[in-house]
Image: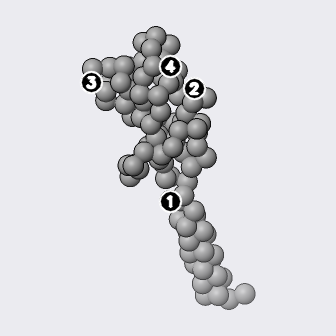
């Protein structure tokens, strides 16, 4: 094969690979903010938590918690993210960017 053809083929294959990778990227990075009322073992009461979940519905991060005066500060063990109540929580009106 001539070198020009090989180089052209390589460029086309790399471009195709980039299209495939970037076409699926937004779906994998999209997260949803959900809210749920769960029992907090630390506060020993029911709290309202807002959390991020991935595209498969798995909780991946805590956004806010009503157990704290400043709801954006949540310096706890985040045991609520393992609560079965989170699996059934509907999405909030806002979504993460």
The residue that disc 2 covers is: 83
Residue beneath disc 4 = 39
Q: Are marks 1 and 3 in contact (CB under 8 Å)?
A: no
Reading the image, the residue beneath label 3 is 70
Q: Are the two marked residues, 2 and 4, in contact with CB atoms closer than 8 angstroms?
A: yes
Report x, y in % for residue 26. Answer: 50, 59
Mark closest to the chain's N terminus, 3 or 4: 4
| Tag of residue 26 | 1
State which tag comes first along the sequence, 2 or 1: 1
Q: Which of the two discs, 1 and 3, sits closer to the camera?
A: 3
Kind of element beneath mark 3: loop
Which residue is situated farthest in the left direction here?
Answer: 70
Asked which secondary structure carries label 4, the reply is strand
Question: Residue at 47% across / 28% down in the picture?
Answer: 37
Q: Earlier in the sequence, mark 1 or mark 3?
A: 1
| Camera-side residue of 58 and 16 | 58
Q: Is residue 78 above or below residue 29?
A: above
Quarter holding residue 65: top left
């Amino acid at each position: 094969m001539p070198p020009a053809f090989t180089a052209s083929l390589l460029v086309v294959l790399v471009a195709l690979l980039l299209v495939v990778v970037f076409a699926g990227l937004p779906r994998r990075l999209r997260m949803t903010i959900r809210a749920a009322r769960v029992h907090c073992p630390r506060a020993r009461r029911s709290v309202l938590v807002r959390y991020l979940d991935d595209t498969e519905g798995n909780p991946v991060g805590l956004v806010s918690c009503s157990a704290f005066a400043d709801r954006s500060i949540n310096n706890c063990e985040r045991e609520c993210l393992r609560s079965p109540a989170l699996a059934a929580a509907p999405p909030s009106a806002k979504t993460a960017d």
